[in-house]
Image: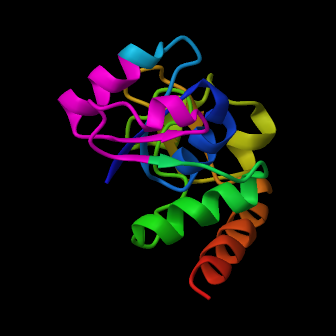
Amino acid sequence: MQFIADVMLGKLARWLRILGYDVAYSNKFSDDAIVRTALSENRVILTRDVQLARRKTVRKALLIESQTLDDQIREVVREFRLPPPKPLTRCIQCNLLLTSIDKNEIFNSVPPFVYLAHDRFAICPNCHRVYWAGTHSDHIRGRIASWFHRANE
């Protein structure tokens, strides 16, 4: 399932990407651009804008009612019965799937302590941002477990 999020849902878009889901997002997308992209790429529109969600040309949209990130994610998970997430597999900036990269290839791209502390790295094929499982990974996995457990209750 692919999504496109409107300007009011940037944080949700970012976290859905962290979870591994495909979410097109830019704070520069107009409502017309969102609808065109949704139609051409078969994406579900995620929005807090009632008028956007109810446009006649919109095929699939979810009007996000909650104002908190945790509840917004649960709304999406519950509504679409999303498959288990594949966290930290997608670039949070570009939305592309990350590719593994040999540690020696990123020597100059990460701080020395990161290079020494980690063996596995991934890189975005578009923006070349380098990712690794830092201390934040455990926190992210804990939040994910909470979202999916409570969404399925």
Residue 54: say if magenta. Answer: yes
Say which residue appears at 59% left-offset and 17% top-offset.
27
User: Is 49 above or below relative to 151?
Assistant: above
In the image, 135: left or right of 27? Answer: right
Report x, y in % for residue 146: 71, 76
How many marks the image carries: the answer is 0
Q: Quadrant of residue 136?
A: bottom right
Quadrant of the rendering where the N terminus is positioned = bottom left
Which residue is situated farthest in the left direction here? 40
Say which residue appears at 45% left-offset and 18% top-offset.
31
The residue segment tinted magenta is 33-61
Which residue is situated farthest in the bottom direction here? 153
Residue 22: say if magenta. Answer: no
Say which residue appears at 62% left-offset and 22% top-offset.
108
Report x, y in % for residue 151: 61, 77
Does residue 101 appear in this view?
no
In the image, 48: left or right of 61? Answer: right
User: Is 12 above or below relative to 120?
Assistant: above
Q: Quadrant of residue 83?
A: bottom left
Q: Tell which of 113 and 35 is nearer to you.
A: 35
Q: Tell which of 56 and 89 is nearer to you.
A: 56
User: Is 80 above or below relative to 102?
Assistant: below
Quadrant of the rendering where the C terminus is positioned = bottom right
Does residue 31 appear in this view?
yes
Its colouring scheme is rainbow
User: Is 118 above or below relative to 114?
Assistant: below
Report x, y in % for residue 94: 47, 27
Say which residue appears at 45% left-offset and 73% top-offset.
84
